[in-house]
Image (cartoon, rainbow, N blue to C red):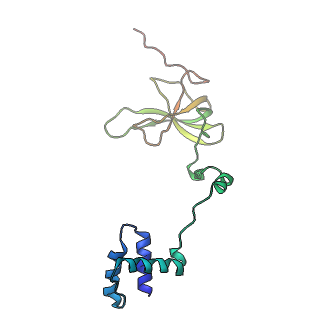
Amino acid sequence: MLCLLNSAKMWKLFGQISPRAVLPGLCRICEKHIVARESSVWSIFSSLEMVHPAFQQVRSITVNQLHRRGPFRKKVNPNKSHPMDRRPQMKGVVIKTLIRKPTKPNSANRKCAKVRLSNGKEVIAFIPGEGHTLQEHNIVLVEGGRTQDLIGVKHTIIRGKHDCSHVVKKKK
């Protein structure tokens, strides 16, 4: 009877396989159970549901239980925490100015800065525009927004705020 139980379990797991497709294969293996009609197949499977706890149907949740539990909330992964705590901008102090090389088709060196944010986390931020006067210990405003051709640079420094000056126009 064990092989019949396993085939019924397979039928429960894979709903596409009909009992008729499962049981003739079973009969060839054990050579004891021969099923003549489809109605007897269903009676075998219904008796298995009563005997074995694996085949008992799972009860669906009631409206009252749903109300008590509340809406489904996705669990937040603590390892994938947002460095700016989901804020649009954040103030930070420049630790070090860097020059990064972009990925393959591009070649111009990009100016970046390592910034310690006000929440204590350190990020690498891109400095947009031509020319800058940022040094160590300057205070800057950082926003989210990655630079496509720089690996690992997911923040941008806002020009014209705090110690980061506006982009100077070229004289004609």
Residue extending furthest toward the right: 68
Identify the residue shown where x is 58% and y is 42%. 83
Residue extending furthest toward the bottom: 32
Q: Where residue 98 sits: x, y (%)?
A: 49, 36
Count of all numbered marks drawn on residues in the image: 0
Residue extending furthest toward the top: 172
Q: Where residue 117 sits: x, y (%)?
A: 62, 37
Q: In this view of the protein, which residue sits in the foreground, 117 or 72?
A: 72
Identify the residue shown where x is 47% and y is 36%. 146
Q: In this view of the protein, which residue sits in the foreground, 158 or 42?
A: 42
Q: Where residue 122 sits: x, y (%)?
A: 59, 42
Quarter of the figure with residue 158: top right
Quadrant including the C terminus: top left
Q: Tell me: residue 138, above or below residue 63.
A: above
Identify the residue shown where x is 58% and y is 52%. 77
Quadrant including the N terminus: bottom left
Q: Tell me: residue 69, above or below residue 107.
A: below
Q: Where residue 58 sits: x, y (%)?
A: 55, 67
Q: Is residue 110 left or right of residue 25?
A: right
Q: Is residue 111 left or right of residue 33?
A: right
Identify the residue shown where x is 53% and y is 73%. 56
